[in-house]
Image: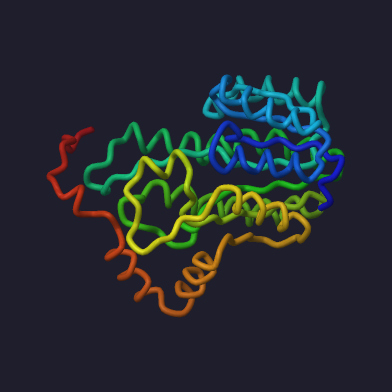
Amino acid sequence: MNIQGKIALVTGASRGIGREIALELAKQGVQRLVLVARDRQRLALVAAEIEGMGIEAVILPLDLSQPIEVHIAIAQVWRDHGPFHLLVNCAGIAHQVPFLQSKLANVQEEIAINLIGMYTITRLVARRMAAQREGKIVNVSSLMGKVAAPTMATYSATKFAILGFTQALRGELAAHNVQVSALLPSLTDTDMVRELQWFRWVMPTSPQRVAQVLVAGLQKDTPEILVGWQSHLVAWSNRIAPWLLEKILLMAAPLPRYEQRPTESPGR
């Protein structure tokens, strides 16, 4: 896909990987960027950077877990600033905790934003792309969508689900000339990740690098875009010796910090 002169919508665009993807798309010459996230002030700052490059930016403060709000906003922005040629689903959150200490409210939040929110906006945009018979959708999963990690059970579950969702859409939407791919970054040095306990021996990549790999991957119709040599090594190891990789992940996981009895009652 040649992105020059195209219109793109990026979710999770207020910070981290989503922000860098939006900035990289602007550098590569998109015509207009629609920026989606919950934080209006952060979005405005990103939009100002993009407009400083001479690219039009539209901010759309949205909570993707609210389907009615999303439906109305997407219909309006498509009418006023569309049609979109590229959708990048990057919005996501993570709660790190051993499963026995996990809380249902956090699990529900991860599923609502990482999965249901992505489904909601993708359904609205994909229908319109199919009608115009043109479009590209990139769903940002994670290396944890290939290899689950201790202390990240629900996050991994949502990222696995995104890969399945992406694979199904790729088959269904191909007849409508809409391409669908997944981006699988490894540990990335963002605000969200800095609040987590990092896994041993893992070297974080930069969000700028992730964005550059994504833009390069847009030129090819590849099902999955892996970022960095660590991602390729882990994916290869998971195919060749999954039992060994599972042991290494257990040793690398930051479990000691959480060695305490669960505080939640069984009925909650």
Against 206, is 83 above or below? Answer: above
In the displayed structure, does residue 49 sit left or right of residue 192? right
| Residue lying farthest to the bottom in this orientation | 240
Task: Count the numbered circles shown.
Answer: 0
| Quarter of image, res 20 | top right
Is 33 or 140 nearer to us in this picture?
33
Residue 91 drawn at (x, y percent): 55, 37
In the image shown, does 188 or 91 lie closer to the viewer? 188
Indicate the position of residue 260 as horizontal and vertical percent values.
13, 46
Color scheme of the displayed model:
rainbow
Q: Residue at x 58, y 31 (%)?
A: 14
Horizontal placement of 3 versus 41: left or right?
right
Name the residue: 71% across, 58% down.
217
Q: Where is the C terminus found, in terms of image quarters?
A: top left
Left or right: 216 with respect to 70?
A: right
Quarter location, residue 226: bottom right
Locate residue 86 relative to residue 160 in the image: left or right.
right
Residue depicted at 64% across the width and 49% down the height: 211
At which x and y percent is residue 28? 78, 46
Judged from this view, the residue extending furthest toward the front is: 52
Residue at horizontal 49 percent and vertical 51 percent from the top: 188
Residue 232, percent across and down?
Answer: 54, 69
